[in-house]
């Protein structure tokens, strides 16, 4: 199938673009709708020419830009466009979205009597029948249409849409490809084929990107295509290419700006992402509340899909703000979103109960209370027992710091399930149940200095940013707060283990026993010291002989099973034969030593500690049974890998794709 798609598109690229005339009508009839909009440019250019106005309105309608069409209709009369033309455009738009329940043949006759071209009327009616799932009526319409125009790409395209609606996906692909092959200028077929490759049960994003690349080449004025192309690039981890596509949009709208913001978020440029949210008028609680309330109102009206899309947008926007440092605003957005989601779910439950007990006044009152925000947007937030975290907890500055900087990802209880966690790969650290990973003590526990260093430097290659702007006092307060989570988690573990003991044994356990048990699991011991040979060998660590010996050891002990190795059969990618999980069963991604910065630092001393102590909580072992001399040679080799000049941070999506083997 890949060969089929590639061959079909290659044929299209080589075919002549000379079909039809280059006039607006010629472009319209060939299906080059964005070129029509570009040709007319604006209603001012075409004045009151009703024919051109209807071509403009028809292009907007077929491209699905109904809101823009309605904006055109509201201002067209002021520019001298006839009322009849405006009414006809509105009628066609209503038919297009399935608002008419007339039979297709009667509707076709009525539209023609109003002055609609036969092609326009058929296109609008066909789309309306698809919206209403009236496949029998659509078959009759297409049958008559095809008798008159056997090679119509529009008919073939609509058959593809009907196949998609019936979940006949391979058949839909065949129709879309045939439509494009017959008419390489049929813009809607490219859009539909790219949508097919992104949404079919077996989504094929690489094919979708190939189609979108050809789409934006042929129809550069289609801003929606550019946004789809950028989104496809983002999903495949090609952030730079996606940003370049968006640069081609001359007058970006909010949807375009938000797509750019999401690309910047995925690339790790959190501050720029937050700036773009401001440009999209999403930089204050009021603006987000309006968005979330709009989604809530849609849910109450049964528009679940549109509501889910808006809610998802609010969620990732809040994630971007949190990672950029605007944590109070992000928390407000998350909490408001969760309030509305809870109300929506409660409303669904009440609807079921009311079906069983329609006359129960208590249920009616409960529904009225739940839906009240839909009638009064922005109200009843954080009331009735629903409260935000208190940033100003008296006498507890550490808790306030944690609430401001950390809880968005790590959760208010330190369990790693903050509101932003579901967007991150791998998941944030669970302070209550898993060990710290960047450690320096011989017993493989983190010192306070280890935790403080991680807070200051962040975790490159993850979503953990640097908090270098915090003072030493603030960092130490956060370290203490994290220790409280660790202690609470260990106490919970101790109680579980105690419950499994015989009653007489459990009753004999004292508080001092717990303190001793806790110390073994929490108190870092002696720091790992560097070997005596370090000072002698450090000057020679860059010699090729030592590096080569380190490379041999790297392979001999099996490091290449997880980490990328140059100049070998494994050079093409990090091994995907074995999926890696942490001790809580969550996916983890081995560091790409060639292309990514190292967690815990790139210096020789940092690498030595990672090699000797491993990374607790992950499959990365502590390397035992090797001489100091061999370990230093291994460090020399790994350190050389870290000198690649174009190393980059990976995105959450790229890490997930690499873990899954894609």
Image (cartoon, grey):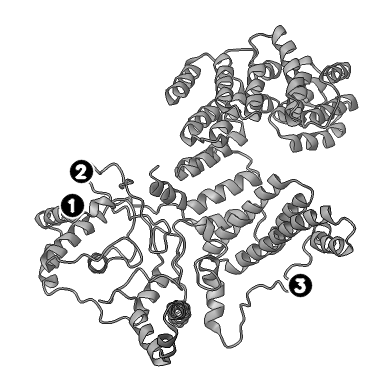
Q: Which residue is mark 2?
A: 568
Marks 1 and 3, how far apart at CA: 61 Å
Q: Quadrant of the C terminus?
A: top left
Q: Residues within 10 Å of mark 3 (few under 14, many from 20)?
A: few
Q: Quadrant of the N terminus?
A: top left
* Percent of width and height locating residue 571: 25, 43
Disc 1 + disc 3, Cβ < 8 Å:
no
Q: Along the polypeptide, which appears first: circle 1 or circle 2?
A: 1
Quadrant of the image occupied by residue 338 = bottom right
Q: Which residue appears at 66% of the width and 29% of the height?
A: 165
Q: Which residue is mark 1?
A: 555
Q: Which residue is mark 3?
A: 384
Tell me the SS state at disc 3. Answer: loop
* Percent of width and height locating residue 130: 72, 28
* Percent of width and height locating residue 551: 16, 53
Q: Can residue 317 be seen by looking at this rendering?
A: yes
Disc 3 + disc 2, Cβ < 8 Å:
no
Q: Is 531 on the left-hand or right-hand side of 210? A: left
Disc 1 + disc 2, Cβ < 8 Å:
yes
Q: Nearer the viewer, residue 90 or 660?
A: 660
Tell me the SS state at disc 1. Answer: helix
Q: Which residue appears at 42% of the width and 87% of the height?
A: 504
Marks 1 and 2, how far apart at CA: 10 Å
Q: Along the polypeptide, which appears first: circle 3 or circle 2?
A: 3
* Percent of width and height locating residue 217: 52, 27
């Amino acid at each position: 199938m890949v060969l089929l798609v590639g061959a079909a598109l290659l044929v299209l690229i080589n075919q002549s673009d000379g079909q039809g005339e280059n006039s607006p009508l010629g472009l319209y009839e060939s299906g080059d709708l964005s070129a029509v909009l570009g040709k007319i440019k604006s209603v001012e250019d075409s004045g009151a020419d009703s024919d051109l106005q209807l071509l403009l309105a028809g292009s907007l309608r077929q491209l699905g830009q109904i809101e823009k069409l309605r904006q055109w209709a509201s201002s067209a009369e002021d520019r001298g466009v006839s009322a009849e033309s405006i009414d006809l455009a509105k009628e066609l738009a209503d038919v297009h979205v399935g608002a008419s329940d007339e039979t297709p043949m009667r509707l076709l006759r009525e539209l023609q009597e109003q002055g609609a071209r036969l092609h326009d009327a058929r296109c609008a009616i066909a789309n309306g029948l698809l919206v209403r799932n009236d496949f029998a009526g659509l078959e009759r319409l297409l049958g008559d249409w095809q008798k008159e125009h056997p090679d119509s790409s529009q008919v073939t395209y609509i058959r593809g849409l009907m196949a998609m609606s019936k979940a006949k996906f391979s058949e839909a692909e065949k129709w879309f490809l045939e439509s494009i092959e017959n008419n390489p200028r049929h813009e809607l077929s490219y859009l539909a084929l790219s949508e097919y490759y992104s949404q079919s049960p077996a989504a094929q994003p690489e094919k979708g990107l190939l189609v979108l690349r050809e789409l934006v080449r042929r129809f550069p004025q289609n801003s929606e295509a550019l946004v789809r192309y950028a989104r496809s690039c983002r999903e495949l981890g090609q952030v730079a290419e996606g940003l370049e596509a968006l640069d081609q949009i001359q007058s970006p709208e909010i949807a375009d700006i938000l797509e750019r913001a999401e690309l910047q978020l995925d690339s790790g440029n959190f501050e720029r992402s937050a700036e773009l949210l401001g440009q999209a008028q999403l930089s204050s609680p009021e603006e987000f509340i309006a968005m979330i309330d709009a989604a809530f109102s849609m849910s109450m009206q049964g528009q679940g899909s549109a509501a889910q899309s808006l809610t998802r947008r609010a969620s990732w926007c809040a994630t971007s703000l949190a990672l950029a440092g605007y944590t109070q605003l992000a928390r407000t957005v998350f909490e408001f979103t969760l309030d509305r989601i809870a109300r929506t779910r409660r409303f669904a439950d009440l609807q079921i109960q009311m079906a069983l007990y329609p006359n129960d006044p208590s249920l009616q009152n409960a529904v009225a209370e739940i839906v009240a925000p839909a009638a009064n947007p922005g109200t009843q937030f954080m009331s009735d027992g629903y409260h935000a975290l208190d940033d100003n907890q008296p006498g507890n500055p550490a808790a306030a710091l944690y609430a401001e900087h950390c809880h968005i990802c790590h959760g208010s209880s330190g369990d790693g399930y903050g509101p932003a966690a579901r967007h991150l790969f791998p998941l944030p650290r669970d302070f209550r149940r898993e060990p710290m990973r960047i450690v320096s003590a011989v017993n493989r526990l983190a010192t306070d200095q280890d935790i403080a260093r991680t807070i200051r430097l962040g975790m490159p290659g993850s979503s953990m940013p640097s908090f270098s702007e915090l003072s030493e006092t603030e960092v130490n307060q956060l370290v203490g707060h994290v220790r409280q989570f660790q202690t609470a988690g260990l106490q919970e573990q101790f109680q579980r283990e105690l419950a499994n003991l015989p009653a007489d044994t459990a009753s004999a356990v004292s508080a001092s026993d717990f303190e001793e048990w806790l110390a073994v699991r929490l108190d870092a011991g002696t720091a790992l010291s560097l070997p005596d040979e370090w000072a002698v060998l450090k000057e020679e660590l860059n010699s090729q002989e030592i590096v080569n010996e380190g490379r041999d050891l790297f392979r001999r002990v099996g490091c290449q099973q997880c980490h990328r190795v140059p100049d070998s059969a494994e050079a093409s990618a990090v091994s995907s034969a074995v999926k890696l999980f942490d001790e809580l069963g969550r996916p983890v991604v081995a560091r790409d030593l060639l292309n990514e910065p190292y967690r815990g630092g790139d210096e020789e001393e940092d690498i030595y500690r990672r090699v000797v102590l491993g990374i607790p909580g992950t499959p990365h072992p502590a390397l035992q049974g090797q001489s100091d001399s061999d370990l230093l040679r291994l460090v020399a080799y790994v350190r050389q890998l870290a000198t690649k000049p174009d190393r980059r941070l990976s995105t959450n999506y790229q890490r997930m794709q690499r873990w899954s083997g894609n």
